[in-house]
Image (cartoon, rainbow, N blue to C red):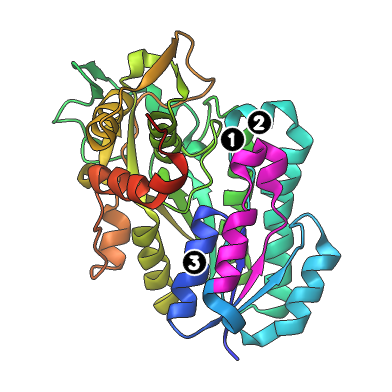
């Protein structure tokens, strides 16, 4: 038996990881206790995703309803599969700025403590397995907001001669910036993953994701930008747009492209690596531009409530540089841009989100 161990297996990246590695012939062991329901209510629940995953993968998928904060529970899973574990994809997390400020202990225990629990179990029971950690660009805090941005009609932009115009590289400092409570817990996890790589020689990687998206997202207001935006337009919900005149820029990468990047690392792992992961110049949008695309796809007018105050620590502009990853894995290619992503989200959810009349 060759096993891919996936935490957060009901979430967007976790469920796509389960399908992807099952497609490569691995048996998938999923760990997920639907904490998204606790974080975000019914909109965020992954119960539907886990049910579909089990139906699609059948005997290739084994599920454990274990909390990543439960060291003993995780240890039992790791002991059961041991050296059969060929890769670990750690995507379980508390993913929201706003929610983290409500329950800092829970946020840190899940994001930082849960990651340490996974790393130590991997070191004890599956030290040869590549450890793929879903980090975030929020580890840079609000540092990107110090960039010399120019306001255009529908977005903010960097001057073309700026070193980061093609995307922010991994040399941006994470120090002396406002991270949000969520960002701080993800910094702790990110640094620990690097440390287990460098200190113990484990093949670990932090993928610092921007907007990771796709049709499998359980779209909720506090997490899931493009999926939630499309859901609001389709259902006639009012979208609360926070600050920056709606011109804040995000790069977006489809879950398929995320998983082909994970596979590339799995096939040729390195020690203690860090990569920014996003759509780069190939796939990015402002909120205003995304609404325009969603309106064109759906034929519906977006209902927007603009709130002057931006979210604390929110990025005004973010585009990832994929140059480092592409240099290490030159065969990897991105395939989805923002209009393709939004159309796929629309088509995948038309039967349950499209309002009538």
Pointer 2 residue: 99
- Distance of mark 3 from mark 1, alpha carbons? 21 Å
Residue 295 on image: x %, y %: 27, 29
Q: Give the quarter of the image for residue 48.
A: bottom right
Residue 75: mark: none
Look at the image and say whether residue 35 sits in the magenta stretch: yes
- Distance of mark 1 from mark 2, alpha carbons? 5 Å
Pointer 3 residue: 17
Residue drawn at x 43%, y 36% is: 231
Q: Please indicate whether residue 213 sits to the left or right of residue 344 in the image.
A: right
Picture quarter with the C terminus:
top left
The answer to which of 10 and 178 lies nearer the viewer is 10
Q: Give the quarter of the image for residue 312.
A: top right
Q: Looking at the picture, does residue 78 appear above or below residue 74?
A: below
The disc, 3 or 1, on the residue closer to the chain's N-terminal end is 3
Give the structural element (helix, strand or loop) at label 2.
helix
Pointer 1 residue: 96
Residue drawn at x 40%, y 72% is: 263
Q: In the rendered structure, are the residues bearing label 1 and label 2 in contact, judged by CB atoms less than 8 Å apart?
A: yes
Is residue 213 shown to the viewer in this render? no
Residue 329 on image: x %, y %: 29, 68
Extreme-front residue of the structure = 357
Q: Which residues are magenta?
A: 29-55
The answer to which of 57 and 317 lies nearer the viewer is 57
Q: Give the quarter of the image for residue 332.
A: bottom left
């Amino acid at each position: 038996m060759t096993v891919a161990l996936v935490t957060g297996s009901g979430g967007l990246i976790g469920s796509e990881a389960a399908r992807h590695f099952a497609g490569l012939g691995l048996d998938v062991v999923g760990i997920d206790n639907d904490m998204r329901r606790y974080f975000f209510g019914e909109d965020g629940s992954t119960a539907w995703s886990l049910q579909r995953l089990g139906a699609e993968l059948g005997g290739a998928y084994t599920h454990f309803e274990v909390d990543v904060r439960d060291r003993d529970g995780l240890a039992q899973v790791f002991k059961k599969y041991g050296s059969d574990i060929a890769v670990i994809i750690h995507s379980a997390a508390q993913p929201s700025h706003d929610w983290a400020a409500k329950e800092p202990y829970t946020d840190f225990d899940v994001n930082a403590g849960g990651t340490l629990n996974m790393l130590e179990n991997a070191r004890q029971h599956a030290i040869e397995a590549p450890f793929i950690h879903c980090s975030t660009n929020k580890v840079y805090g609000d540092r990107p907001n110090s960039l010399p941005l120019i306001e255009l009609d529908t977005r903010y932009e960097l001057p073309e001669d700026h070193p980061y115009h093609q995307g922010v590289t991994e040399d941006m400092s994470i120090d002396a910036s406002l991270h949000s409570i969520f960002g701080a817990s993800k910094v702790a996890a990110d640094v620990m993953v690097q440390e287990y790589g460098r200190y113990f020689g484990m093949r670990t990687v932090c993928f610092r994701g921007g907007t990771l998206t796709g049709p499998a997202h359980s779209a909720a207001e506090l997490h899931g930008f493009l999926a939630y935006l499309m859901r609001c337009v389709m259902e006639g919900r009012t979208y609360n747009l926070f600050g920056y005149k709606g011109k804040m820029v995000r790069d977006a990468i489809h879950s398929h492209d995320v998983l082909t990047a994970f596979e590339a690392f799995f096939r040729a792992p390195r020690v203690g690596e860090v990569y920014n992961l996003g759509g780069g110049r190939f796939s990015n949008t402002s909120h205003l531009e995304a609404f325009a695309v969603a309106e064109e796809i759906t034929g519906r007018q977006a209902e927007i409530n603009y709130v002057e105050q931006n979210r604390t620590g929110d990025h005004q502009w973010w585009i990832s540089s994929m140059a480092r990853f592409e240099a290490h894995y030159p065969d990897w290619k991105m395939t989805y841009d923002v209009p393709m992503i939004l159309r796929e989200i629309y088509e995948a959810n038309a039967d349950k989100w499209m309002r009538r009349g």
